[in-house]
């Protein structure tokens, strides 16, 4: 799944955005908050799902504007694969994910373990694990559980925490990081 050009994106705007990214190094940890406030010209998210076999490489924000078609693709990609339920994914969570990915300076896509979860799926998972919250932000489309083969969970968590945009859970035993746009907090190890 890849976003194509649309009437909302001008060719010149996309070319300017790509040119700008070659001139500006990936944000450092100290620049994370600035990135989330719009310091970048484009925002891109790259993910794949081992459950569905789908891949996503989407520019979802260009020059201060979110791209509705790209957000719709992301919503579908991050659906509850167990039920097929789709929920609008909170843009703030996407921004945290994109900023953390840029700070880690990786080209590898995230492995999405969990995005949106229906209440039924969340209840089912709670019966199997103490680590699943009753009122999980996954059910609101505000959280993602992610993995990168080329970075440790500690490296991923450090980048996400530097964004100061929400919650970051480090699950070393399960080898993933939870990122959400809820209250700023961190847990795990």
Image (cartoon, helix red, strand yellow):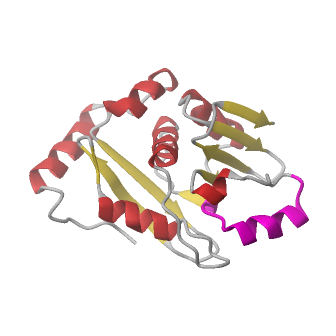
| Quadrant of image for the C terminus | top right
Say if residue 147 shows up in the picture. Answer: no
Residue found 65% across the figure and 56% down from its top: 138
Q: From what the image shows, is residue 179 above or below residue 45?
A: above
Q: From what the image shows, is residue 24 above or below residue 12?
A: above
Residue found 25% across the figure and 67% down from its top: 4
Report the front residue among 9 and 2: 9
Residue 118 lies in the magenta-colored region: yes
Residue 169: quarter of image:
top right
Q: Residue furthest left?
A: 12
Left/right of residue 142 with respect to residue 125 in the rendered view: left
Say if residue 170 shows up in the picture. Answer: yes
Residue 172 lies in the magenta-colored region: no
| Quadrant of image for the N terminus | bottom left
Left/right of residue 135 with respect to residue 63 in the rendered view: right
How far across and how far down the image is residue 107, in percent?
46, 50
Residue found 72% across the figure and 33% down from its top: 186
Residue found 67% across the figure and 47% down from its top: 178
How far across and how far down the image is residue 47, in percent?
51, 60
Q: What span is colored magenta in the figure?
A: 112-130
């Amino acid at each position: 799944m890849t976003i194509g050009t649309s009437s909302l994106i001008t060719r010149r705007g996309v070319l300017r955005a790509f040119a700008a990214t070659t001139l500006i190094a990936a944000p450092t940890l100290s620049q994370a908050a600035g990135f989330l406030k719009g310091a970048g010209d484009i925002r891109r998210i790259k993910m794949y799902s081992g459950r569905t076999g789908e891949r996503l490489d989407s520019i979802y924000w260009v020059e201060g504007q979110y791209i509705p078609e790209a957000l719709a693709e992301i919503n579908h990609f991050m659906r509850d694969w167990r039920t097929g339920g789709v929920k609008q994914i909170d843009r703030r969570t996407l921004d945290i994910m994109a900023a953390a990915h840029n700070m880690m300076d990786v080209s590898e896509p995230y492995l999405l373990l969990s995005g949106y979860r229906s209440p039924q799926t969340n209840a089912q998972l709670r019966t199997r694990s103490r680590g699943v919250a009753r009122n999980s932000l996954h059910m609101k489309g505000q959280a993602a559980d992610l993995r990168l083969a080329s970075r440790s969970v500690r490296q991923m968590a450090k980048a996400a925490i530097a964004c100061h945009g929400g919650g970051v859970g480090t699950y070393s035993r399960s080898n993933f990081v939870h990122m959400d746009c809820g209250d700023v907090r961190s847990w795990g190890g």
